[in-house]
């Protein structure tokens, strides 16, 4: 089994499509060695069709929601690479700026691997404004374009969205892409009264990342 696993890892790391991604993110965000280490970690920890992406929702809320449902966030998929006390984690050896770049690279690899599958779950605030007005969050700027084929034409089958911060709707999923079926949300849930979302401030220095 170990030999098969090693062979699989070598094949995946040598895939032309993965190298196409590396040509975009290395060395801008990661070294190739770091990128390959991240992909090996994902290959080892991956739970098929159980990945969760998020935008505009508190990180703690996302992790709790995913953990309760046996699903996998980027943080949980990264394992020891995100554990600051573990020797494998790069955070203690990077400045905050370097770590931000590193995490952009991680997001790109996570999204690329998700795009090889059928479905991914996305957590956001409820409509009418589900995404940051700037369009410059990691999800909007990096992950979603990759899910939709920006790197090599490979697209995820479907993105479903859930609004976990709305009481009683923590498991109400509807299709967001390729067809946005938000009307199903409005048919079952009234977004009035949820309050206006206070979006975090995006650095004025931030520019489009991939597209």
Image (tube, grey):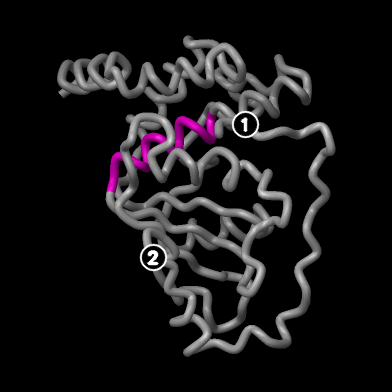
Disc 1 element: loop
Residue drawn at (61%, 74%) of the image: 127
Residue at image mark 1: 209
Nearer to us in this view, 166 or 176: 176
Disc 2 element: loop
What is the x, y in percent for residue 30? 57, 17
Residue drawn at (15%, 21%) of the image: 4
What is the x, y in percent for residue 39? 40, 25
Q: Is residue 178 left or right of residue 126?
A: left
107 in the magenta segment? yes
Q: Residue furthest front?
A: 211
Mark 2 is surrounded, within 10 Å at the Cα level, by few (under 14), some (14 to 19) or many (20 or more) other residues, namely few
Residue drawn at (49%, 57%) of the image: 67
Nearer to us in this view, 184 or 67: 184
Q: CA distance from mark 2 to mark 1?
A: 25 Å
Residue drawn at (52%, 79%) of the image: 169
Residue at image mark 2: 179
Q: Which residues are magenta?
A: 106-117
């Amino acid at each position: 089994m170990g030999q098969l696993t090693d062979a699989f890892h070598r094949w995946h790391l040598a895939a032309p499509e993965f190298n196409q991604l590396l040509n975009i993110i290395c060395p801008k965000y990661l070294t190739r060695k770091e990128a390959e280490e991240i992909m090996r970690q994902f290959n080892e920890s991956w739970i098929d069709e159980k990945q969760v992406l998020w935008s505009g929702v508190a990180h703690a809320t996302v992790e709790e929601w995913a953990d309760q449902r046996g699903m996998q966030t980027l943080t949980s998929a990264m394992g020891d690479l995100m554990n600051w006390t573990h020797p494998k984690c790069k955070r203690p050896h990077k400045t905050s700026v370097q770590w931000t770049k590193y995490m952009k690279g991680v997001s790109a690899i996570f999204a690329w691997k998700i795009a090889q599958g059928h479905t991914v779950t996305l957590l956001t605030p409820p409509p009418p404004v589900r995404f940051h007005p700037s369009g410059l969050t990691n999800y909007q700027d990096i992950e979603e374009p990759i899910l939709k084929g920006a790197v090599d034409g490979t697209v995820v089958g479907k993105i479903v969205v859930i609004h976990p911060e709305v009481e009683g709707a923590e498991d109400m999923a509807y299709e967001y892409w390729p067809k946005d079926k938000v009307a199903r949300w409005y048919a079952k849930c009234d977004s009035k009264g949820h309050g206006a979302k206070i979006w975090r401030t995006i650095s004025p220095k931030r520019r489009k990342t991939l597209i």
